Amino acid sequence: MIALMTHGSRDAFRALASQHLSPQETEKWIGLLRPGVRLEVAAGMDDVVGRLGGLPALPIASQWPAWEGHGPLSFIASIDCARLPKASLDIDLPEAGTLLFFYFDGQLDDGEALVLAEDRASWAGARVLHVAADEKVAEREAPAGLEPYPAVQLTARAQMTATEPWHPRVRDAFAPGAPLGNRYDHPVCAQDFLDALWEFGGEAGHQIGGHAHSVQNPVEIEVAEAVLDGEVPWHDPRLSEETDNWVLLAQFDSEDTADMMWGDAGVLYWLIRPQDLAERRFERAMFTWQCG
């Protein structure tokens, strides 16, 4: 599948869609947009909401996250929940505290062990932690063998996000029962509409909430397949139902300024069930990654 434009203002999305869809179809498509927070490299007087790389501030009594049998995870990003424009989101993020993202990036074994959604044994290779605002923390040095990524400060911008026409939520709105993850006979899947979305701008970028920018098929399908142990075929409605249980928590793109490259210019994704998010059960978040 081709990567499509996934972020912009509601007015920009409506103007684009109205050139290719009927007024009724345009409004239905606009209704499927979700608010997200784009994270961009901060410059000048930008408000800083987090950073890529650097060293994490961990609770005094906690251990550096590790994958048993493989070693410690690399620190990817830190997000200050209190500084995010949470009112612009439709997911229940904590009001305060810090989200820390860790991933086994292959530094310790030259990429031999891969963290894959479909491999339960590898799930410990990616973690997200929430450190409460009142916890005593200290910045930790990276464990032996890990080279920290350069620290890059991030600023935030609230935008609307779109997803692929073959995403189950869009498919169910326009072509219920169409094959999961495939194009179907409707103008939202027409090549001219897809080309227009592509030309608008197709970079994945870093993001909190909203629709994920999937490099391949929708990441929600990958996660749903994984939690169902790959035993449910794509035509089974249980897979669509499970897909609908997951929302994007965060995605982190490859980033030159932080020396981050995930495969072939890929993206790291953390997804979570809304109920687990509301209960702050971040240990239940699921990870996957995609590249071109």
Image (cartoon, helix red, strand yellow):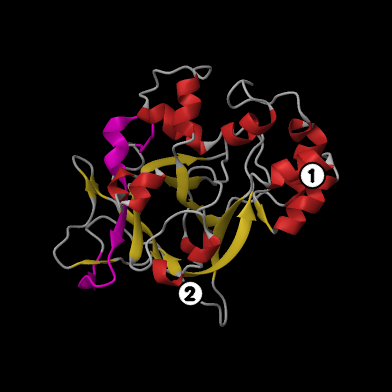
Q: Which residue is mark 2?
A: 48
Crowd class of label 2 (few under 14; some 14 to 19; many from 20; radius 10 Å): some
Q: Nearer the viewer, residue 264 or 224?
A: 224
Taking the spot 27% from the left edge, 66% from the top edge, the residue there is 132
**CA distance separating discs 2 and 1:** 33 Å
Taking the spot 37% from the left edge, 25% from the top edge, the residue there is 228
Taking the spot 51% from the left edge, 65% from the top edge, the residue there is 87
- State the extent of the magenta-drawn residues as a range: 114-141
Residue 202: percent from the left, percent from the top?
67, 49
Residue 199 showing in the rendered view: yes
The answer to whether marks 2 and 1 mark residues whose Cβ atoms lie closer than 8 Å is no
Instruction: Say above or below: 275 vs 82.
Output: above
Residue 146: percent from the left, percent from the top?
29, 56
Residue 241 relative to residue 110: left or right: right
Crowd class of label 1 (few under 14; some 14 to 19; many from 20; radius 10 Å): some
Q: Nearer the viewer, residue 75 or 250?
A: 250
